[in-house]
Image (tube, helix red, strand yellow):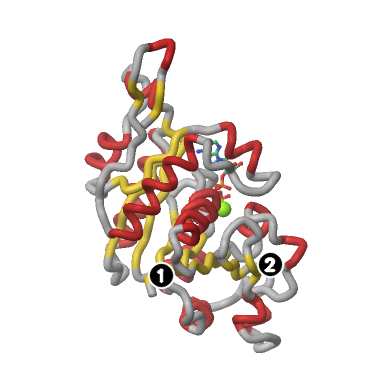
Amino acid sequence: MRKIVVTSGKGGVGKTTVTASLGRCLADMGYAVVMVDADVGLNNLDVVTGVDSRVVYDIGDVLSGKCHVFQALVRDSESSARILPSAGGGGEMSAQAFRGVIDSVTDCDFLLIDCPAGIENGFHRAVSAATEAIVVTTPSASAIRDADKVITLLSAYRLEDVSLAVNRLRPDMAARGEMMDAEDIARLLHTPAIGVIPEDDCITIYQQLGRVPSFALSEKAFLLFADNVANRTKKCAELRMTGRRRRRRWL
Ligand SMILES: Nc1ncnc2c1ncn2[C@@H]1O[C@H](COP(=O)(O)OP(=O)(O)OP(=O)(O)O)[C@@H](O)[C@H]1O
Ligand SMILES: [Mg+2]
């Protein structure tokens, strides 16, 4: 089983979005996926995946012995993935206890851990339970600088792999030199960008309604991203713009 923590330096860069969309793409590819909300207290993976109204038990209940981990897993309505929610319980959970809960999930191929923002206790707890990390950043200078700090911190953990997801990229701006592109960011951070997700209004619109549809650019980008994750490839998964200016197409 691969246990991948989705983390970042700066908050609000898209960790929960990446966890949900990547998890669903991997589930569509036929893998058994569990997504864990490690953002205890400020949980929102349940809201983003739309399962919040069906949550009965959370990770805190598993920890206190109120239920078995399999009773707390909620089936995603948009894919075969399952979600281990955090409804605010278990805030004082130690890294060891969290890891115990994670290790009790045995029947999946991919376990994606949605890490809280910042580098405090919650970060340590989430990263300690993982075997790989994906660091999410946007192309903004402050997010890249904070990603750099987190990548340095991650070197203290025994992780098999650390990769990058560049979110909210504007390829048109990158092409004009107004924004760094994914390859530049990967080079700067000495970390491969295996996921490159464009800024996409569909994410804002459809996140509240259910799943981002497959025609959305971001969903195409997530498919390339999931392919890289599943096959452990390090291709820079950037969508390329082709065609004449007035009839642009994305490949
Ligand atoms: N590629 C994108 N295009 C447009 N909007 C996006 C994109 N990615 C994320 N967003 C939006 O950005 C906001 C923050 O995303 P998200 O909650 O996933 O970030 P986060 O890193 O999990 O935040 P936090 O640090 O608070 O946990 C959300 O409203 C989401 O819809
Ligand atoms: Mg989040």
Q: Quote the CA–CA distance across marks 2 and 1.
A: 22 Å
Image check: 187 left or right of 194?
Answer: left
Observer able to see residue 42:
no
**Percent x, y of residue 178:** 36, 20
Is residue 106 visible in the rendered image? The answer is: yes
**Relative to residue 51, is residue 242 depicted above or below?**
above
Query: Which residue occupies the foreground of this view, 138 or 21?
Result: 21
The type of residue carrying mark 1 is Lys
Question: Seen from this angle, which residue lies furthest right?
Answer: 53
Q: Is residue 100 above or below residue 111?
A: below
Confirm or reject: label 2 Cβ below 8 Å from ligand 2.
no
**Residue assigned mark 1:** 3
Characterize the local packing of mark 1: few (<14), some (14-19) or many (20 or more) Cα atoms within 10 angstroms: many
Q: Quadrant of residue 154?
A: bottom left
Give the percent coordinates (x, y) of residue 197: 43, 39
Q: Amino acid at mark 2?
A: Gly
**71 left or right, relative to 31:** right
Rendered-image quarter of ligand 1: top right
Callout 1: SS: strand
**Who's the residue at 69% across and 55% down the image?**
50
The residue carrying mark 1 has its beta carbon less than 8 Å from ligand 2: no
Residue drawn 58% across the image and 42% down it: 213
Task: State the SS at label 2.
Answer: loop
Residue 206 sits in which quadrant?
top right
Question: Which quadrant is home to the C terminus?
Answer: top left
Q: Is residue 205 left or right of residue 177?
A: right
On-image quarter of the N terminus: bottom left
Query: Would you name the residue on which mark 2 appears?
Result: 88
Q: Is residue 44 above or below residue 143?
A: below
Q: Residue at x 49, y 50 (%)?
A: 18
Q: Earlier in the sequence, mark 2 or mark 1?
A: 1
